[in-house]
Image (spheres, coloured by chain):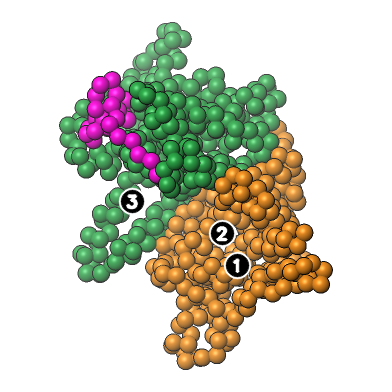
Amino acid sequence: MFYRENGQFKTSYRADQQIFPITQDRIAILALLVVAFVVVPSLASDYMFRAIFIPFLIFSLAAVGVNILVGYCGQISLGSGAFMAVGAYAAYNFFVRIEGMPLVVALILGGVSSMLFGIVFGLPSLRVKGLYLAVATLAAQFFADWMFLRIQWFTNYSPSGSVSVSNLQVFGFSLESPFAKYMFCLVLLAVIALLAKNLVRGAVGREWMAIRDMDVAAAVIGIRPMFAKLSAFAVSSFIVGVAGALWAFIYLGAWEPAAFSVDQSFKLLFMVIIGGMGSIMGSFFGAAFIVVLPIFLNQFLPALASVLGIEISTAGVSHAELMIFGGLIVWFLIVEPHGLAKLWSIAKQKLRLWPFPH
Amino acid sequence: MAFFLETLLGGLMAGMLYSLVALGFVLIFKASGVFNFAQGAMVLFAALAMARFAEWVPLYLGIEDPIIGNVLAFIGAGGVMFCVAWVIERLVLRHLVNQEGTTLLMATLGITYFMEGLGQTIFGSSIYKIDIGMPKDPVMILESTFEGGIMINKEDFYAAIIAAALVALLSVFFQKTATGRALRAVADDHQAAQSIGIPLNRIWVIVWCVAGVVALVAGMIWGSKLGVQFSLTTVALRALPVVILGGLTSVPGAIVGGLIIGVGEKLSEVYLGPYVGGGIEIWFAYVLALGFLLIRPQGLFGEKIIDRV
């Protein structure tokens, strides 16, 4: 009843092609932004910022990047962790080695380095497809793991490749408090997500989707596979690289190569699949799910055990977490293989009719 | 020259061990089109089961003889792997028929997490030993030809023989038995196989079982080499380049791929490693596989991929 586009007539192409054509969607997005920028900061505690909101924002950003590659262009990548690592270490080098380098510029340069790295490791995608490509992208992952562990120059000759940054500030504001960190990540995420949304509904995005749906057919109708695939790799790894730099600078502060292991790649792919392939919105759902679930299990399991009167050790809890995490993922894939974004669109469809049955 | 040969032989034997893990991937992909990331977790699970059963058999049954103990443990672990296969088919695969490859891949990743948790909950998470009585001392061969001879690790040598025997056994099973024929039929075309009355579900259970037994053998050998511990799951990551190099659908491909990767890894580590700081084994295997893929995108022995619009 409330969610109806009847009567919202579009009288110009501009109005027809705007990013959120339905008035209710615009209102919902505005409300969401208000919640993110005003309500959450005024309610959340420091712990909430650190444990939930900041990781959620950064992983959402990374998931948007991965979704462009996997969900929109159909190139399965298990090397996202490597792109994050390249972004983080490149930004670190720019930040530390060049005197007076502003943080934002360092982050963007980190993203650009990750983009170049992504293009190089995206080259095989022109020839290798599907699962073969997925495994081939692991090459990027292991290469990056090795590179930051063994080539000391990248890590400023620190032992075991662990580096740290401190005294971060943006335009004179110090990024020390969780609130400032949250706002900084939020602004970056909002800007990049908007750009990504616009990209995927433009000409480039349509090329990506054509390649995803069937690359031979796309090539036949005149889409350049090389341009489409490499641009997807470039955009995706840029975003993932920026997210990696944020993860390192803002969330971790001090990190070593193991922070961007292959597990991170799997996690990102989980976010995309569970959230919904080919949906910017879905990336947020997926990131929320993957970030919140372990925290929830971590808090909930010992409480449950004490209620039931069972003693479980810390190791037992972490094993149970693994099992529940794995089980839930399988269950999710069975119940809704198209991800949370699909549930969202079903809900919207239902809302159109509600409260009437037809 | 002797050193080169030594490295080469070492690489070949390590390669056989990789192909043992790779075989598990290929078997399942062939029969059900699932790229089974859980193979590594299955190796760990099987090795844990085997190690603990071998501990429990003398403890509870009072059988002291190590050979009978090990055989009983092997049978027990095989039974466990059968249950795992059955449960996976029942609870996961059956519900995911006709889904995309990526979804299935992710489901097996979910299974990986689950099995890692479950295995360590049931069997414990410390480091265990598997002692199947393989000799550990190295031997020298060809001492008359080369000065000093070539050193061969006896354990690796036996492991390679076991792996080769398993491969031979599997090929006979695939080529000569009725079940093997049914498996190949399913691998060729699910629908056609189903329409002539081959029960798909049972075939899947069988093939996951076979993969489970392969994982058990791999877990046994790797476990006795490295000790049974969590890091055993990473052998799957070591075996992945083997799979794509040989082709996802080819059993001989897994063997040849394993040998190429094994040799490539060892030679690169020895001859190239010192120049770039060492530890290049892992990514070099992937880059090597990638190099082959650029020439043959479907792997050395994989079926040719034909795209139709």
Q: Are dots 2 and 3 on a single chain?
A: no
Q: Is residue A213 visible?
A: no
Residue B125 point in image, percent of width and height: 41, 68
Q: Under tag 2, what secondary structure?
A: helix
Label ID, residue B235: 2
Residue A302 point in image, percent of width and height: 25, 61
Point 54% across, 29% down: residue: A116
- Closer to the N terminus: mark 2 or mark 1? 1
Q: Under tag 3, what secondary structure?
A: helix
Residue holding disc 3: A294
Q: Chain letter for mark 3, please.
A: A
Say which of marks 2 and 3 sits in front.
Answer: 2
In the image, is residue B255 above or below residue A158? Answer: below
Give the colour of chain A. green
In the image, is residue A76 above or below residue B243? Answer: above
Q: Under tag 1, what secondary structure?
A: helix
The three-letter amino acid code for the residue at tag 2 is Val
